[in-house]
Image (spheres, rainbow, N blue to C red):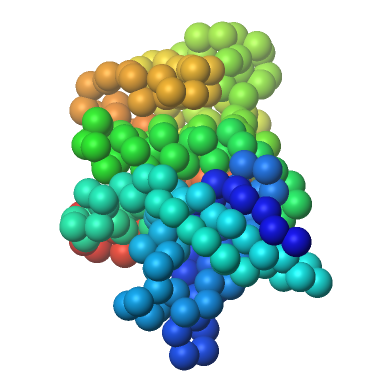
Amino acid sequence: MFKTTNALILREVKYKEADKILTVLTPGDGKLTVRARGALRKSCRYGAACQALCYSELTLFGSRGRWSVNEAETVEQFLALRSDLALLALGSYFAEALEAVSDEDSPNPEILQLGLNSLYALSRGLYAPEHIKTAFELRLMCLAGFEPDVFACAVCGADKPGDALLSLRGGVLHCRGCVPEDRGVSLPLSAETLEAMRYIITAEPKRIFSFAMPAESEKQLAGVTQAYMSAQLERGFAALDYWKSVK
Ligand SMILES: [Zn+2]
């Protein structure tokens, strides 16, 4: 059985002599594991399209639940990522995060679109890498079912809480005076940070990066989205650690 699908290559692992096992994200099938025979050979006609962080059109052959690449053509290579170590590390973190929230047989085309938009913005230098990372992290959490409720205090309902705090585990907002005893770790949000979070959560998919804020608040926001994602997913990311060491 053959099928053709576009796919973002999230991860590649060498297998046997010259094969690769690819983890890819597709619009219609969610995450798939695919074998690319001979992809490591120089002569392989589809080798380039089977590299990590390529968006490619794959023609797959399926047999007994296993898929292998029959043909592959590059749709978008995000070339600039491949000549800059820090950008490549950040792009790899995006891929690692996309893989973490995606399942097989559970398509979420919006998550794929977020990944593609973020890699595009990164490779074209449309915004600072940290800015793209922040919007990516928060929006990814929303699409993966971990949207924080930052539109009103969880206790008193105030929609412009003074000295707001975000509970990392609960994903809810509190005024300083409303914070419950057992809240766990909470991080302070300035008015600008809160406004930016509301923007990222509600903006049209292609507009999530279109916000500006003072550098100090942007730094706070970056810390909040990263801490929130790691608290919600209860894990770290090797590519994120690597990015921090090379940026
Ligand atoms: Zn309150």
Q: Horizontal and vertical percent for residue 13?
A: 48, 75
Q: Horizontal and vertical percent for residue 102?
A: 64, 51
> Left or right: where does residue 80 sit relative to residue 29?
left
> Left or right: where does residue 159 sit relative to residue 123?
right
Q: Horizontal and vertical percent for residue 54?
A: 40, 54
**Residue placed farthest to the bottom in the image?**
17
Q: How many marks?
A: 0
148 vs 50: above or below: above
> Left or right: where does residue 139 sit relative to residue 74?
right
Front in this rendered view, residue 247 or 154: 247
Q: Is residue 231 visible?
A: no
Residue at 56% x, 9% y is: 159
Location of residue 182 by image quarter: top right
Q: In which quadrant is the C terminus drawn?
A: bottom left
Front in this rendered view, residue 119 or 230: 119
Residue at 68% x, 19% y is: 155
Front in this rendered view, residue 238 or 41: 41
Residue at 66% x, 13% y is: 156
Q: Horizontal and vertical percent for residue 154?
A: 66, 21
Q: Is residue 68 visible?
A: yes
**Residue placed farthest to the right in the image?**
64
> Left or right: where does residue 43 sit relative to residue 110?
left
Q: In which quadrant is the N terminus drawn?
A: bottom right
240 vs 181: above or below: below
Residue at 41% x, 20% y is: 207
